[in-house]
Amino acid sequence: MWRILVVLIAVLTACTGNTGIRLAGGGKSAYEIRIPDNPAAQEERAAWFLQTYVKKMSGVEIPIIKGLESFPDHSVVIRESVSFANTDGFSITTTGKRLTILGGDHKGCIYGVINLLEKQFGCRMYAPGFEVVPKKAKLKLPALNIADQPVNVYRNVFGWLTDDKDYQDWQRLDVMYDFFAEGYYVHTMNTLVPWQENFKKHPEYFAEINGQRVIDQLCLTNPDVLRIAIEKLKSEMAKQPGKILWSVSQNDVNSYCQCKNCMKVIEEEGSPAGPVIRFVNQVAAQFPDKIISTLAYQYSRQAPKVTKPADNVQIMLCTIELNRSQPIAEDPRSASFMQDIVDWGRIAKHIYLWDYTVNFNHFTSPFPNFHVLQPNIQMFVKNNVFEHFQQSNTDIGHEFSEMKSYLISRLLWNPEINADSVITDFINGYFGPAAPFIRNYFDTLQGEILKTGEWLFIYDPPTTYQNTFLSEANINRYLGYFGQAREAVKDQPELLLHVKTCELPVQYATMEIAKNQMFSGRGWFEQKDTGYELRKPMRDMLEDFYTTCKEAGVRTLSESGLTPENYYQSTLRFIDLKIEGNLAFKKKVTAEPAPSDKYSSGDLSYLTNGVKGATDYRVHWVGWEARDFTLTVDLERVLHADTIQISSLYNPSAWIFHPASVTCLISEDGAAYQPLGKETLGFDQRAEQTIRVYQFLPVKKPVRFVRFDVTGTKHNPAWHPSAGGDSWVFLDEVIVK
């Protein structure tokens, strides 16, 4: 699998004197499928694929028989061959009445059968559980002499779709642990030398930053760290002897050791990657029959000037910081990455490209990046990248997820295909009569981002684009297309669900933008003489969104694990205005220290604007990083209250935790405060509710000033993947009644 061959072979010619074969017809077949006496797993699976789909097409079941010493002319022979330089390569030939499918010893036989089913019979698998299999009374093949192999030796379009093994094989994809050892894919330094076991006794094993030893990373020039890591790997490799790839890579924290020895190496190498590569090379020398993988990511992305990676070292080069609206090679903002990939390509034998093709904070939101997929993959290959991890987080309900997986898998096999033809094939097959309207939506959306070339980032909320490709006019156009698409398949439930699921991102963006413009023309509310009234079309859209998510089986809406149920409930909370009877509405709030201006501009008025934050910390939440703080609300007059509330948010993947404790105090004069109550969660928070409401009962006590003393968690807990990193507390909506 890891033998690199960059020449694509794809040949289809007529065999002189060979008129083709009739595989099935008239409800019967003269053929049998032949595999070796002791078949490899892929030979059996390839035979099963062929038998299964011939039966689906014609109703005829061709028997599978073991043994290749002798067999009749009317045979389909499937077997592995060591003649293929690429272990996924295959050939399909007809000789007389015999059909022979040979494959490399990874999955070449399987891919040969899939090629036959797709190219010769028109079968398609567009998504797990959805395939197009033409019904054919006769299955005839012309004379064939086909040979093909992938340009790229490792092809992973990451996501939940490939949990379906039939889908994985049909799309010719690899998955993470086909070759990587379990638990050793990425960010493994803490696995090799855990800070929980070592930091107290040996702080020198860990990174020195600003003169202090911290647990963020390891000190890679410390010989004891190297010794412990090698010993750990020896032990782990004995448990998984068949695994080829083992990661020795930095933790997911953007900092590195700056001790005297590490800085000396960094200066010599011209990059913080220097200590990493020297360390990993020493590890790799101990395991010459393995490939040791390490990251070129964030601070380590720039290649070292002196040290080359060993031949059995894989460089995992990451594109996380880049813009997705323009091809990387054409975007001046990506010039530093282009230099990095060129530099790594000159010195590394194995480059594993980790690309990001989805909005991680908003899976279910329009993300028009299809036009950059092909040129980016072509550029990667041009720079000696033949191992690809396309992090698309594919799943039901994610924006064009099935089509993105379908296209990228084919681009990874052959970067020179006609991408537009693949898109057309998918849209026509997956949406049926609704295809023209889905195509109009797709083309319009892609066209809008091409007009602006604006920064398209993998974490930005829909509100970032509310004046461009998600403008009110554009949203209305998109919804119009979907209205036509629904009408076109209204009597075809399966296709109708495809259309409704495809519409989810437009609905999601509409609702999220409305949260940011609550009382404007695009908001959830309109002002009437009697006050603010919830717009019925918006409320209906929420119900339609939620119903479709349940019907389609949508599991997550973001990388943090936001579920449709949580989104639905938090949105109901958000649109439940707390204006009438809320004594804190639009009252002044002060804070010591002030919140970060990164979110909601640090505007404390969000805490008393009557709108309760939902699940996105970027909308209507106010945050503090790694500190304790105090909030004070001035109710402007002394009054008697029954309840006092404030809420906090929990999103560990974004380093957001509930406060360790919240204490509520009240005062009549702003000088003398009396405690009303305290709620304590502590610092080791696991599986908490997304939004927590703290309620305190004044029991008719006189109050003008309400104060909250908040103890932050300050650092990610020990169980967190980025343990020790600075954590956040986000608060919203003070309600006094």
Image (tube, helix red, strand yellow):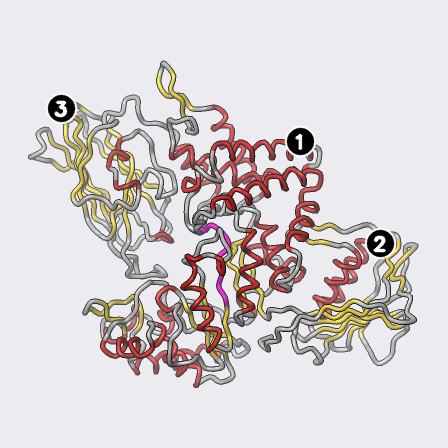
Q: Residue 561's x, y, as percent?
A: 44, 49
Given the image, on which type of amino acid does mark 3 rest? Val
**Mark on residue 638?**
3
Please say whether residue 627 is one of the residues in the magenta stretch: no
* Label 2 – label 1 distance at C-alpha: 33 Å
**Label 2: element kind:** helix
The residue that disc 1 covers is: 487
Looking at the image, which is closer to me, 215 or 476? 476
* Label 1 – label 3 distance at C-alpha: 59 Å
Left or right, residue 312 beside residue 671 = right
Q: Is residue 653 above or below residue 692?
A: below
Given the image, on which type of amino acid does mark 2 rest? Ser
- Residue extending farthest to the top is 529
Q: Are marks 3 and 2 in contact (CB under 8 Å)?
A: no
Q: Residue 146's x, y, as percent?
A: 77, 69
Position of the N terminus, as image quadrant, is bottom right
